[in-house]
Image (cartoon, coloured by chain):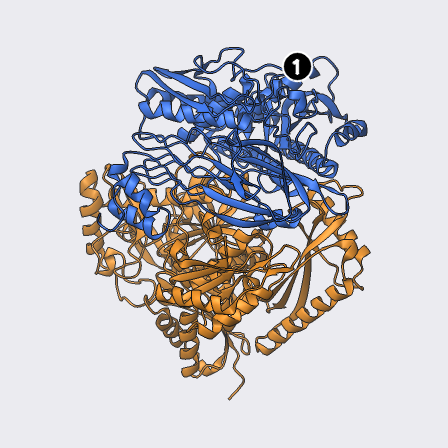
Amino acid sequence: MIDAVTLAVLKGRLEQIADEMDATLFRTAFNPIIAEAHDASHGLYDAETGDTLVQGKSGLPIFVGVMAFAVRATIAKAGRGTLVDGDVFIFNDPYDGGTHLSDFKLVRPYFHDGRVFCWLASVGHWHDVGGNVPGNYNPVASESYQEGVHIPPVKLVDAGRLNDDIVEILSCNSRQPTSLYGDLNGQVNALDLGAKRLGELIAEYGAETIATAFAELRAMAARLMRAHIRDLPDGTYSAEDFLDNDGIADRPLRIALDLTVTGDRLTMDFSRSAAPCAGPVNIARSTAIASCYVALKHVFRDVPANAGCLEPVDFVIPEPSILAARAPKPVGGYTETILRVIDVVFQALAHAAPDRVNGCAYGTINALSLAGHRRDGRRWVMFSFFGGGLGGNPEGDGLNHGNAPISTATIPPLEILEAAYPVMFTHWALRPDSGGPGRHRGGLGAVYELELLEEQADIFLFGERGRFAPPGVVGGRPGALNRFTYPEGSALKSPPMASKMVGLSITRGQRLRLETPGGGGYGDPRQRPAEAVRRDLRLGYLTPEAAKRDYGTDGNGS
Amino acid sequence: MSRPSVVVGVDVGGTFTDLFFCDEASGRLGTRKVTSTHGDQSIGFLDGIVAGGHPFATLAAIVHGTTVGTNALLERKGARTGLITTAGFADVLEMRRRDRRQTWGLWGEFVPVVPRDLRLEVAERTLSDGSIRTPVDPQEVKRVATVLRERGADSVAIVFINAYANAANECAALAALREVWPNQHVSASCEILPEIREFERASTTALNAYLQPVVASYLAVLDGRLKERGSEGQLLIVQSNGGVMPVDIAARLPVRTALSGPAAGVMAAAHIAGSAGFLNIITGDMGGTSFDVALIAGGRSVLAAQTTIDFGLVVRTPMIEITTIGAGGGSIAGMDRGGLLRVGPKSAGSDPGPACYGKGAEPTVTDANLVLGRINAERPIGGKLSRLDVAAARRAIDARVGTPLGLDTFAAAEAILRVANSHMAGAIRLVSIERGHDPKRFSLMPFGGAGGLHAGALIKAVGLASALLPRYPGVTSALGCVIADMRHDFVHTVNRPLDALDVEGLQRVIGEAARDGRGLLERSGVTLEGIGTYVELDMSYIGQTHTVAVSLPDDGPLTSQAIQAAFEAAYRQTFGRLLENVPMRVLTLRIAVIGRRPKLDLRRLRPEGGSVVEAQTGEREVWFEGRPWLARIFDRLSLPVGAEIVGPAILEQPDATTVVDPDLVARVDGFGNVILGRKP
């Protein structure tokens, strides 16, 4: 047993280790997706099962769920060879380890008294790992080989000695080898630091106490989750939503959930979802489970972030399906699909607990990459994700320009982007009328517009919600659709696949414009106080036309 | 008449104004505490100086820790502020860095300090390399300024994209704006924070503008009144990083005072605790309205490069890391709609004040301490009241807490303290346990007038080793003002690869800043032990967006080899391994010119002679754990070095009261501090 104060101290110390690993990587990484947008995560994992023991507070939420699968894949591989102190495995296989090829996982055993005590892992989104499209969001990939280089779990560091051959293989498969080298080093540093800090903690409290704390924290999470589920009325609650298309065939793809509450257990049944698709919006089963974990954690916030969370939850995910894809089905656009999974969890839970959920968030990460060559011949790739509105909720309006539920990523400052790449932003603003109407309106999406300053660049966009807007809940209405426009001759055009685009080329002085969705509304818009509508009009969040249409008033009493 | 020789530290809190006097000629020290005056804090400020008995003409320096800026930010009571931006970017301030309030949970709005209809755009554009693509039109700036005035803006900020790389457009706009703006409340980002990252720069600049009218007018009135009364001493203001700056700079850069008062307290705490041999300290400043907690580990307070005052209100200037909760002596106790006993965050402040002040009907933490016998009704702290009204305190507690809960007065008062203590314990856990510090290795250093009433309960609740009560806990922040170093900071954006760096030019800039800083310090008239210049470069490998702070050696000529060696040492120290064949970049040059103030020898505060027997002033009934105990009462300042007082006991002094619980023991150390610990 362990007393409550020691447990609280150890919970803080262990989370601190993961947080410090996050911070080390954020500060040493080369690519802004990690350094500024924090698309990375670190944690401690069970020696035998790979289950999540402790996760940092600053890393990307979606990784919290999938890292356990990554460690499990490493354990399976390590079981076939020798494992010694100082080993570090590296891989990016998305079927075993979750997410997509850009996410490189580094996994390291932590030895105590000659045996593995637990695992430390680091995952980070690298800038470019080969494939057809710079930045790896290839909206027309039909096999994962087109999305980037595949690395199975292999030893990057063997008993403390870095295998330079592997670094060379990786480097020559990237359009951005320096960035890759910097990020890889940052991850190795983070693991070194984690091992050092864990060693200090074990020296102080003893391995047995730490192991007990792991078990207690897990039991606490399971207990809390059960209590939350028990609060929901028994029954089956259903919701469905759609992806625009898979980038290859312009057909909507259904994501459907039947959520059943029975006492203190929850069953999440995705059987009515679409079959595997040709394009890159498939996800692996591990990724689907991880996204349910993220959705539940957003609703039941006080449950500690470890494997105990999912103990009272059963999953029904048909194999194969769009939510349980197998190699080599392309998975590069996994972010869009998991956002939709989270949206259906919110919509289904809205029937069971209307006072605990919010309207859907903007629901697309809008991965935009621009690639070209500078005058001196050097290659450049700018790659970034963009924000939108969050959903209205029981407490108030949704947040304007927030980050996606799967992420805590901040957007790189436009001054950092302009300093690094030959672009000039001409617009970086809130998008009026984009918040879904409701008693509590959805938050506003954004308008980003940029101009190319070099001779020529190739443009790639991977987005969603161009055809199916983010739904509201409890009577709230959807936010605005995603919209991307580019110049063609003297006209402005949008991509035929709505928000997915390859092979577009622009020249100096031409501009791209991205208008992102707002969040879905919460509650009946007719119940919105007139004063709130008038304020939105005064501040320009709402135009008079939209106020008339959505709220039946133009603010002047008519 | 002799040269002015008195340095006075003044800390204005929500309830009391505390003063610490140090006569540098005679070595005499003194303290005073007076009631704060709301509406115009300068009245209480001057009252306090008069009460201290030093004529205004003897003041060499008045060092001020102020909460005027802090309160305006927390209560959102800054000026109506306008913002002028580059066309296309008026929403940057509201869009933040695309974040949200918390990792888990998607609720919560953000209201920027400048509303959208007061954020106007002008056509202008500077590129990231510093070249100007579109010059600014001064006439257009004047036009939008007129619109902002018409919409009621009293203060205005200018933030242009890439102004860190070339400030020409901002400077031109600033000049145009000054021609038409009817007051001095104009802030430009190139003057406030010339650093890359538009949101952080915009937020810091806008908050500066938001505070300027409030802070500048307060300081101007204060400075004027001091001079009227015959003071020739410099008025100096404590910055959030613990250094001190002249009043004219504070009026121009009020954002640097965001945590002025609390920072002074932490500076003092580090010095007092360090002198007494305590290196791991958690400070708990309990005043009338709030409880501020900070951590000092290994003798050093934690400095944060930027602070988020509230979600989306980012201030990027170095600050001492302080956590604040709304719990103080004035915190109001009452039942919520769910039938739960709540204490705070609403406070009775000093007007109407606790029920025992005779004006208000709502019970506070102070009232609970009074009815339990922990505070002496005949010797109220602060001096304005001659006695406290115990009957009024009882009535308030009975009516609002006792009757609804079915408890007698004493049990209700103890319940109020239990809830208040658990709030404060939570704040202490947040900065210690939740950040992985073991409380067993830390001591609590409570200060503010009320800290000593709760120290015993807090060390037991959190599991801290002991509590260290400074000799004058009620005036710790004021003492911090007196010992804080003078500090002038300069920032300069370099943004060059190391191999293309103009090292001579850099050395020239450093030399000029050092000279300017030294000049400012020497003209200040404040006694200094020495002046040091500290030069830091923010550097990274090219490709990284985050930097490491690289301290430059202060001896020998500056060369790019020396800079590279310093960077590699700092990088290895921070991250472990260096990168091979990757070039380096220098982003920012920071220079701090610090004038070291003489450190007070705290032994001068220690008691001389005396005895425990003589120090005892009586006995009274004090309630602990549901029953009355006969507690001995001591005049704390008369207790000799080495005295040991076994609880239950109450140690009284003019500006604070210390409670020694029945299971605790208090010991007076060689500096006159009281160390509170468990009975062996």
Q: Is residue B113 visible?
A: yes
The residue positioned 31% from the left and 62% from the top of the image is: B380
Q: Quadrant of residue B329?
A: bottom left
**Residue A116 appears left or right of B432:** right
Expressed as whole percent of the image width and height from the top left, the position of residue B186 reads: 47, 67
Chain (orange): B
Q: Is residue A61 above or below residue B121?
A: above
Front one among B634 and B209:
B209
Chain (blue): A
Front one among A272 and B680:
A272
Mark 1 is on which residue type? Ala
Expressed as whole percent of the image width and height from the top left, the position of residue A437 reads: 33, 37
Q: Which residue is mark 1?
A: A76
The residue positioned 49% from the left and 11% from the top of the image is: A318
Give the crowd class for mark 1: few <14, some 14-19, many >=20 residues within 10 Å: few
Q: Is residue A2 visible?
A: no
Q: Is residue B245 above or below residue A384?
A: below
